[in-house]
Structure formats: structure tokens, C-alpha cells
Image (tube, rainbow, N blue to C red):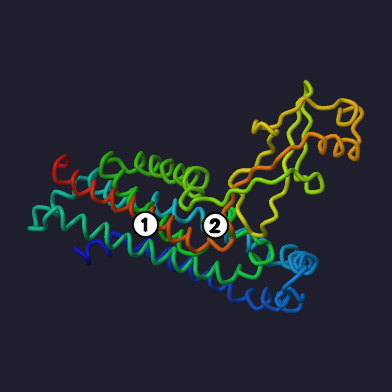
Amino acid sequence: MIWLTWRQFRIQAWTALATLTALAVALVITGPEVTRLYHSSGFAGCRTDCAALSSGFLNQVINGTTGPLYWLGIAVMFVTPALIGVFWGAPLVARELEAGTHRLVWSQSVPRSRWLVAKLLGGSLVSMATVGLFSLAVTWWADPIDSAYLNRMFPEIFAARGIVPIGYAAFAFVVGVTVGMVLRRTVPAMAVTLVVVAAVQLVMPFLVRGQLIQPVEVTAPFQTTAVKSLHIKDGGGITVTGRVSQPGAWVVSNRTVTPSGVTFTGPVDAEACGRTSFSQPKCMAWLDTLNLRQEASYQPANRFWALQWYEATVLLTLALALAGFSFWWIRRRLT
């Protein structure tokens, strides 16, 4: 069964190896230049007041030839798990069920459970190894840039670094196999797999990740010297938020509230903050008289690896649950 699974899977495996090799070559060629700029900019040895050095380093890297590779690396890490589920997981079983060749295998003294174990285990390990190597290469290469941006905790970066992509790869592959087994049609299984994996990639950062560890919650007087955004709405409404001074933190929620604890929405003072008579000094002075407070919750930067392990565990648990469902389905419902 291992040999047969490899025969069915070898094209995808060789394609992944070729892609990984191409990416590794690009990273090896450009990596020394990123490291050189990192050290020559002075940012590498900076410990305090590093904003100017960080900005200088990023301007050299992002505006140079390595900039597109940085964004490409992020895109690859988000897209690869979905592609694994669509092109590796979904067709692996659905194609055999659609053609009816699974009956021939089962008639050759190969139990259906063993048949499924070979497919799930072999495909999952290859998927996890492939994405793990991708992630290792990209995380190593982008580390100086991430250090300057202080963005590893941000949702658009977090799942493209560390071990979380491995969890997404395993989950996506098992989703593909399970959906293919249930639908028994390759193309519909590929479409459904793509939707499911994309949905989980959207739901996880916005509904789950921020709660895996209890966020740090802070309440402080609203500071008009640290306004992040101010928007005056039609009809006299206003929204204003302050900055959270936690470098590298992921801000889960941030709102400005009145002394009674209600989210501040105005009404606006038309003379100080009106659209036609806006004056920043007068508007800030008016906001100071309202005794507003800022309520924020955030995940600090030093929780990066803890959250990585928690999220990867959640994804692997979902993959195992789907695998268990697949074994139940193949015994009870599949003929």
C-alpha cells in the first residue's frame, strides 16, 4: 500500500520538491544581501530609539530587489496549505472512488482501514514536511525584516511564520481527503475543500486566535497626544481611537469610551471639530474636556511562540477529528 500510494502521489511530491528548491535558491541568493543591509544599517545592534534605523533598513530592503520576495513569501505560506488540500488531498481518494478502482484494491486482501491509513499518513507527512521546510526557509530569511516591522503577531504575518503553517497543511490535506470521500467526485471535492480551508484561515485569526490565551486588558485615560484615528461622520457623529504603546503587540480590541463606559460616538462639537470648521488644536482641547477613557486588549509580542503552539495544536486536533470521521465513514457508509 505504501508503494501504491507513492505511485499515486509522486507527481505532486516531485512538484512540491521542485517548488521548494526554486524558493530555496531564491532565498539563498538574496539572504546574504538582507543580512548585510541589516547589519550595515545599524539596526541590528540598536537597543533604544531605533525607529530611524528601522525605517532606513526597511527602505533599503523593501524598495530593493528583495522587497517583492518578502511579500511573495507571505503569499506562498498562506496559499500553499489551501493548494495542498485542493490538489493533493481532495483528488487522492475522490479520484479512486469516482473511477471505482478502490474496489479492486479492497479485493486484493487489503482492508479498507489499511488503505485509508496509507493515504492519510503518507500524504499528511509529505504535506507537513513540505510546508515545514517552506516555513523554515521563509521565517529564517524574513526574520530581520520582521524585526524591523515588529509585525510577527499581526494576522497577515502570524500564519506565515513558525509552525502554524504545518498545522494548516495537515488540516487542509485531511479536509481534502474527507470531503473527497464523502462527495466521491473530484472537482466538487476540490471546490468544497478550497472553501473550507479559506474559511478556517479567515475565522481563526478573527474569532479564535485572540482567545487562545487571555488577552492583556488595559484601561487608561484617553490621551489626545496619542490619537491613532479620528473620523467625523455625517450627522454629527465622531469616532476616535488612541494608540496602544506596546511595540510588536497584536491589538485585539481598542475603543474609546465615555466615563459611563459607553463607546464614544459624539455628538461632535461643530465649532471645534465640525467638517467645515475643523481645527485640530481646538478639537483635541474639546476631547480633553470629556474625560474619555481608552479600553484596549492585546496579545504582547512575547507570546508569539506560545500562540504558535496553541494554534498548531488546534489545527492538528481538527485534522485528527476529521481523520477519525473518515475511518467511521469508510466502515459504515462507503461501499
Identify the element where label 1 is drawn. helix
Looking at the image, residue 277 lies above or below residue 315: above
- Does residue 183 appear to the left or right of 63 in the view shown? left
Mark 2 or mark 1, earlier in chain: 2
Looking at the image, residue 268 lies above or below residue 106: above
Q: Mark 2 — residue?
A: 158
- Does residue 121 appear to the left or right of 144 in the view shown? left
Q: Mark 1 — residue?
A: 170
Q: Using the rendered view, name the quadrant where residue 122 is placed.
A: bottom left
Inter-mark Cα distance, 2 to 1:
17 Å
Horizontal and vertical percent for residue 219? 65, 45
Horizontal and vertical percent for residue 43? 74, 73
- Does residue 152 appear to the left or right of 239 in the view shown? left
Which residue is more in the foreground, 33 or 233?
233
Q: In this rendering, which labeled residue sits more in front, label 2 or label 1?
A: 2
Which residue is more in the foreground, 260 or 257?
260
- Does residue 16 appear to the left or right of 69 in the view shown? left
Q: Using the rendered view, name the quadrant where residue 263 is placed.
A: top right
- Name which residue lies at 62% across and 75% down: 31
Amino acid on which disc 1 is placed:
Ala
Q: Residue furthest top?
A: 235
Amino acid on which disc 2 is placed:
Phe
Q: Quadrant of the C terminus?
A: top left
Horizontal and vertical percent for residue 150? 65, 61
